[in-house]
Image (tube, rainbow, N blue to C red):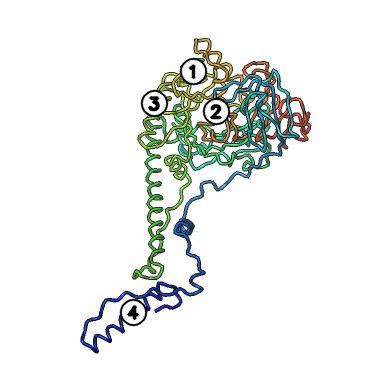
């Protein structure tokens, strides 16, 4: 018998002694032993002092130990190292504020403090702490920072030459294993030009040659030596997929697909393979959790042979299937390059077949034809204002496309760039789309249209809880415009990212160039973002 094991062991010991004594008495007197209740053992001083761990704490510790022994592929092996630039408490007062939530505040004020939006409201209601920077913005506008949901900056940087063209891995119809962040060149001069246009966040996507193009990278538009220093903290990954002409054109003479039905067959085969891969890991997790739970219960060797059991082996990792399984889990958001309405409808059916969700259709020049279906399925249409006709599947567009998508109850329209030029003027792109909608009688107010380049892309990218609107507690990603942002004459005057002023049109020292530009003809250390 073990000794020194505390009150339970002492109780067992006293019970045995009592029983033996009773049996001995019976043997002497020929009587059956009387039923006895052992007296409770007195606790020693040491036993009294020893704390009893709370059951919930013990369970949590056991669960943590079990999790540490279960193999789990890292969800983000290249984590963000982004740290906001230094900022000062700043009050912008007197501006017209479009909050991105559908509100418009005339003669408003916004306070940024500690990298967050501290308050938004009427000018007389928002107070600044002592020592705060005060910006008089009478006659000017304030909006959330612009978000470009479809960018190729960094993967197709400027200068555009073969050696830096790293956006399309055109080696297989399914390259879900590649990640855009591993191609992003942080010194792309396009980033600072986008900053001068009020862009504070971008989703950088692989190209559209493949059925599955790979993972996206969501970045803050800040100067950085590494892409990790730009990565938006806590943002989910996106998956780029493409339908229609591009995969047909690239792979038609390389073993396929060469038809739209071949495209669909390729997607479905990949999802079937991904579902099987996901099940292998789910089964492994279930078996491993049971194994370690059972091992914890039998740690004293009560179960014969337990010491010979070995833990279950995890499946072999596959980077391609890992990404697709993440989409099936809902951890990775699906961005689908698709022009034609009929193809979008079929992709929605396919998503239901395999249990994943399409977050957004990109380019979507025929989105107006199925605007009700998109709204019903909570899918955003990512469109241009008036770019069309450059190939047949882009032909049947209308300038009112974004407005018609937005007009549906629960409609979600987004204006994107897909261009190192358009990204500098997304406010004007949104203005054109708004004007076309108003021309047909939809009466879209500016406070609604601003959502197409702020709130809605944040929603589709899974970062609306952090940015995209001017609400207390969110990241202070803010643009002060010289006038109405829907006017062709207006410029972004000051751009704040997490409360830090990173661009000032009136101050050349806050108009950075990238390191790549330095030392080249006509390129000084500043003045690169717009001057």
Cα distance between the residues tagged 4 and 2: 74 Å
SS assignment at label 3: helix
The residue drawn where x is 76% and y is 25% is 506
Determine the CA span between mark 2 and mark 3: 25 Å
Q: Residue at x 40, y 72 (%)?
A: 8
Q: Find the residue positioned furthest to the bottom.
A: 28
In which quadrant will I find the N terminus? Answer: bottom left
Q: Position of residue 164 (x, y in %)?
A: 63, 36
Q: Which residue is mark 1?
A: 401
Q: Secondary structure at mark 4?
A: helix
Mark whose residue sits in front, 4 or 3: 4
Disc assigned to residue 455: 2
Q: Which residue is mark 3?
A: 345
Element under disc 1: helix
Mark toward the start of the polypeptide (4 vs 3): 4
Residue 259 or residue 512, whichever sits in front: 512
Q: Position of residue 248 (x, y in %)?
A: 44, 29
Query: Quadrant location of the C terminus?
Result: top right
Q: CA distance from mark 4 to mark 3?
A: 77 Å
Within 10 Å of the Cα at label 2, are there few (<14), some (14-19), or many (20+) other Cα atoms? Answer: many
In space, the residues marked 2 and 1 are separated at their CA atoms by 19 Å
Packing grade of label 1 (10 A; few <14, some 14-19, many >=20) is many
Of residues 148 and 465, which is closer to you in this image? Answer: 465
- Cα distance between the residues tagged 3 and 1: 17 Å
């Amino acid at each position: 018998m073990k000794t020194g094991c505390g009150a339970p062991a002492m109780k067992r010991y006293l019970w045995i002694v009592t029983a033996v004594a009773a049996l001995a008495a019976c043997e002497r007197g020929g009587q059956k032993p009387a039923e006895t209740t052992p007296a409770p053992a007195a606790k020693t001083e040491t036993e009294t002092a020893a704390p009893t761990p709370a059951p919930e704490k013990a369970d949590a510790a056991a669960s943590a130990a079990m999790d540490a022994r279960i193999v789990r592929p890292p969800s983000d092996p290249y984590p963000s190292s982004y740290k906001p630039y230094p900022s000062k408490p700043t009050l912008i007062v007197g501006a017209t504020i479009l909050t991105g939530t559908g509100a418009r505040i005339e003669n408003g004020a916004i306070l940024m403090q500690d990298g967050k939006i501290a308050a938004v409201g009427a000018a007389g209601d928002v107070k600044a702490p002592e020592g705060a920077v005060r910006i008089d913005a009478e006659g000017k506008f304030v909006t959330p920072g612009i978000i470009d949901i479809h960018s190729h900056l960094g993967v197709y940087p400027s200068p555009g030459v073969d050696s830096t063209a790293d956006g399309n891995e055109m080696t297989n119809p399914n390259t879900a294993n590649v990640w855009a962040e591993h191609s992003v060149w942080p010194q792309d001069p396009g980033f600072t030009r986008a900053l001068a246009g009020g862009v504070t966040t971008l989703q950088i996507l692989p190209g559209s040659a493949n059925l599955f193009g790979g993972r996206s990278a969501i970045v803050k538009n800040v100067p950085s030596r590494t892409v990790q220093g730009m990565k938006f903290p806590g943002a989910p990954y996106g998956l780029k997929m493409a339908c229609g002409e591009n995969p047909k054109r690239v792979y038609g003479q390389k073993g396929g697909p060469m038809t739209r039905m071949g495209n669909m067959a390729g997607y479905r085969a990949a999802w079937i393979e991904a579902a099987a891969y996901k099940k292998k890991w789910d089964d492994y997790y279930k078996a491993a959790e049971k194994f370690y739970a059972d091992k914890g219960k039998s740690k004293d060797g009560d179960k014969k042979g337990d010491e010979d059991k070995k833990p279950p082996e995890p499946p072999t990792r596959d980077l391609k299937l890992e990404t697709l399984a993440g989409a099936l889990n809902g951890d990775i958001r699906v961005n689908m390059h698709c022009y034609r309405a009929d193809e979008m409808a079929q992709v929605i059916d396919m998503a239901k077949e395999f249990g994943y969700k399409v977050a957004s259709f990109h380019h979507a020049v025929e989105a107006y034809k199925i605007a009700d279906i998109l709204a019903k399925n909570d899918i955003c249409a990512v469109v241009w204002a008036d770019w069309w006709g450059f190939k047949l599947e882009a032909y049947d567009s209308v300038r009112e496309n974004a407005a018609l998508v937005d007009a549906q109850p629960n409609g979600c329209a987004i204006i994107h760039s897909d261009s190192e030029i358009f990204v500098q003027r997304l406010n004007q792109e949104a203005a054109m789309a708004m004007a076309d909608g108003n021309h047909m009688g939809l009466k879209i107010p500016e406070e609604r249209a601003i959502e197409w380049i702020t709130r809605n892309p944040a929603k589709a990218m899974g970062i609306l809880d952090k940015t995209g609107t001017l609400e207390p507690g969110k990241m202070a990603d803010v643009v002060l415009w010289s006038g109405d942002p829907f006017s062709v004459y207006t410029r972004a005057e000051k751009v704040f990212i997490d409360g830090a002023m990173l661009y000032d049109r009136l101050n050349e020292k806050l108009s950075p160039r990238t390191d790549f530009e330095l030392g080249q003809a006509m390129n000084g250390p500043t003045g690169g973002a717009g001057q």
